[in-house]
Image (cartoon, rainbow, N blue to C red):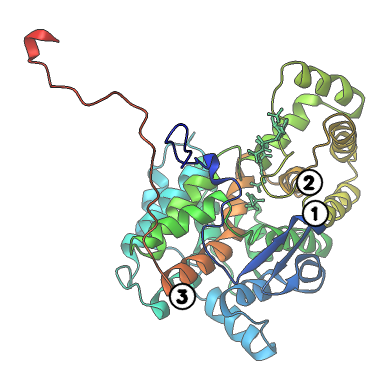
Amino acid sequence: MSESTGKPTIYKGLVGVYADVSAISKVMPETNSLTYRGYAVQDLAENCSFEEVAYLLWEGELPNAAQLAAFKAETAAEREISPALHRVIREFPKDGHPMDAIRTAVSFMGMEDPETADVSDAAQRRKAKRLFAKIPTAIAAAYRASKGLEPLRPDPSHSFAENVFHLIQGKVPQPEVLKAFDVSMILYAEHTFNASTYTARLVTSSGAEMHGAITAGIASLKGPLHGGANEAVMHMLKEVGGPEQAEEWLSTRFDHKALVMGFGHRVYKSGDSRVPTMTKYAEKMAEVVGDRRWMETSRVLAAKMLREKNIHPNLDFPAGPAYYLMGFEIPLFTPLFVAARITGWASHVLEQAADNRLIRPLSWYTGLEQRPVPPMSAR
Ligand SMILES: CC(=O)SCCNC(=O)CCNC(=O)[C@H](O)C(C)(C)COP(=O)(O)OP(=O)(O)OC[C@H]1O[C@@H](n2cnc3c(N)ncnc32)[C@H](O)[C@@H]1OP(=O)(O)O
Ligand SMILES: O=C([O-])CC(=O)C(=O)O
């Protein structure tokens, strides 16, 4: 509370506020590093599968071979979505955004889930695994329905990454592409109290269940200041056109004081821990596809942003072109982020519920003073 104005300190955007404790991941902006349950994210990305990382986030430890096999079998068996959800998806507006489709599908899955009202830790964990398994099926079904195509059935013998490509593209790509995709899933899996994760925790804090929290998380992730930026980055790269135009294009953005998508971060001010690994794999995709234009354009933009604004790229910057080079259409990029972040969101829902206190901050009123309600004739 300021003594002169009587106004409390307002933490707009909750900048610099520690809202709770968490044992899931740690962002260390001073060293541009990030750990999940104590493991450096780039080590996990190079050495583990996304399924291993999902298990790690939920159970706190990496799985041994038997635990991993059981986790993969359990989740692969849950990949089908119901005939009712397929019918609902077929009714979605064809030009709706795939993020709105997956948000609606997850909400519907909550209504059909056999344990929907059970907020015990065991039931919430089972619901998280069902969401992890079914989200790619729902994303793919909605995408294919929007193109007038029949959905494809998930294949339980496929890995998580193979299954995503099979469901969306109807084919499983070469191992280098699968590895790059898996790396993107691992890097996107978790990131402390970002906007969508905090949204999921806030929903959980009222005693609400897993599907409600995840539906809200998806709504938050869609925004262009958060997950929606991976789509915006690719639209931007296409608008720039190529490396030759990049310097001039960016100067015009600077003249208009416009945001440059895929740059800046609330916590990292000298580089996002995940960018070097994602850039390495995006470069590999450019080699595989034989199209260096997007990575060259990215390199020119990033160099000028750093030189003239001292602003570094965030994970969405290399993830956008990586997904494009993997053959995904741009409106699917943020839904792919959902397929990864369900792991982090669910970990936070469980952690919040295990030691809960209703999240309810205060607002400092700046509206009109109290006044009488005038009669209708006097308005
Ligand atoms: C996975 C993720 O969600 S990562 C984030 C993805 N989002 C984006 O890429 C969208 C573009 N980036 C942004 O909008 C912002 O950097 C955010 C929202 C990510 C972070 O916002 P904040 O922490 O509030 O940063 P803040 O606004 O304080 O930025 C500091 C300065 O850098 C500028 N800045 C930050 N990001 C950018 C950018 N992308 N383009 C141009 N200028 C920028 C701000 O305008 C501000 O300038 P000022 O001091 O002259 O006003
Ligand atoms: O941490 C943030 O604010 C945004 C981010 O990078 C993420 O959610 O991965």
The amino acid type, in three-letter code, at marker 1 is Met
The residue carrying mark 2 is: 318
**Residue 190 position (above or below residue 326):** below
Q: Residue furthest front?
A: 3
- Give the structural element (helix, strand or loop) at label 1: helix
**Residue 329 position (above or below residue 375):** below
Relative to residue 94, is residue 172 drawn left or right? right
* Closer-to-camera residue (220/373): 373
The residues tagged by marks 2 and 1 sit, at their Cα atoms, a distance apart of 6 Å
Name the residue located 60 percent from the left edge and 37 percent from the top edge: 224
Name the residue located 63 percent from the left edge and 60 percent from the top edge: 164
Name the residue located 86 percent from the left edge and 26 percent from the top edge: 246
Residue 102 percent across, percent down from the top left: 48, 50
Q: Is mark 2 within 8 Å of ligand 1?
A: no
Say whether marks 2 and 3 touch (CB < 8 Å).
no
The residue carrying mark 1 is: 278
